Amino acid sequence: MSRKYLAETEEDLAHLRKMLRRVMGDDADTVRRHLAKRDEARVLDVACGDCREAEVLTDFIAELKGPSESAVKLTGIDVRAREIADAQRRYGGKREFKDRPGSRECDFMTGDASKLDQHAEMGEDFDLVFMRHQNYWHSARTWEEIYDQALAKLGDDGRLIITSYFDKEHELALEAIQRLGGELIRTEFNPETRELQTEGKSVDRHVAIFRRKEE
Ligand SMILES: C[S@@+](CC[C@H](N)C(=O)[O-])C[C@H]1O[C@@H](n2cnc3c(N)ncnc32)[C@H](O)[C@@H]1O
C-alpha cells in the first residue's frame, strides 16, 4: 500500500469520525441513555468489505456509552471472503487498551447480508447497524433486501447509519429505507469528502441516520 493511499485512508477515517458525531447530533442523548443500560454495546457493520472503519465505529459507540463501561462488540459481514479475511487479520479478536477503559471485540464473517436472518449466530438487538458506501445502484433489489434485513437487526432505540458515494444513490437509498420502515432522523453532507476519479463520487459524501418507525 502506498504512503499516499494510507494517508488518504487516515484522513477519510478522521472525517468519518466527525461525520458520525455530527449526524448523531441531538439524538446522542437518547442513544447515551439507552447504551448506559447495556452491559455490552453491539455494532453490526453490513457489507463491511475490509472494514477499515472498525476502530472508528467501536470508538464512536464507546464514547457514547461512557468511559467506565465501554465494552463494545462489532460484527462485520460481507460476501467477499478475501476482504473479510483481511478485516479479521487486522481488527479481529478482543482488545483492551492501557489508555482507554473497557474493551473492543471484533468478529467478521463471510455471508450474504440480504439473508441476515439466516445468521442466528450473529444475534439480534444491535445498538448500531452501519453500512458504509451502500451500493443501491449496483442492484436495487438486493440492496432493498439488505436494508430490510439491517432494519430488522436493530434493537429498540438502535440506530442505522449509512454513508453514500453519490448524491442520487443516497437519495434513492433514503427513499427505500423509509419505505421499508426506517424513520430518517437526519442526513448530512460531508464538507470534507474526498473526491474520487468518477465525477460526482466521493468518500462518505453523505451520512444519514435512522431509527425504526414505531409500528
Ligand atoms: C461499495 S462497497 C463498500 C465496501 C465497504 N463498506 C467500504 O466502504 O469500503 C459495497 C460492498 O457490498 C458488498 N456486498 C454486495 N452485496 C452483498 C451482499 N449481498 N451481502 C454482503 N455484502 C455484499 C460488496 O462485497 C462490497 O464490499
Image: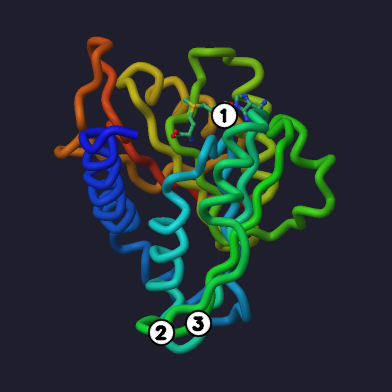
Label for residue 123? none
Image quadrant of residue 68? bottom left
Which amino acid, mark 3? Gly
Q: Amino acid at mark 1?
A: Arg
Please tell me how crowded label 3 is: few (under 14), some (14-19), or many (20+) other residues with Cα within 10 Å: some
Q: Quadrant of residue 125?
A: bottom right
Placement of 7 over or under 205, stated as above or below: below
- Amino acid marked by disc 2: Lys
Residue occupied by mark 3: 102
Question: Would residue 19 be found to the left or right of residue 61 on screen?
Answer: left
Is 34 rendered above or below residue 204? below
Cα distance, mark 3 to mark 2? 10 Å
Distance from disc 1 to disc 3, alpha carbons, whole Å, reads 38 Å
The mark that comes first in sequence, 1 or 3, is 3
Local crowd at mark 2 within 10 Å, few (<14), some, or many (≥20)?
Answer: few
Q: Is disc 2 in contact with disc 1, using a CB cutoff of under 8 Å? A: no
Residue 133 placed where, x, y %?
A: 43, 31
Looking at the image, residue 115 lies above or below residue 53: above
Where disc 1 sits, the SS reads helix
Q: Which mark is residue 179?
A: 1
- Residue furthest out toward the bottom: 68
Q: Which residue is mark 2?
A: 98
Residue 197 at x, y percent in the picture = 24, 14
Q: Which residue appears at 61% of the width and 47% of the height?
A: 76
**Ligand 1 quadrant in view:** top right
Q: Residue furthest left?
A: 191
111 sits to left or right of 155: right
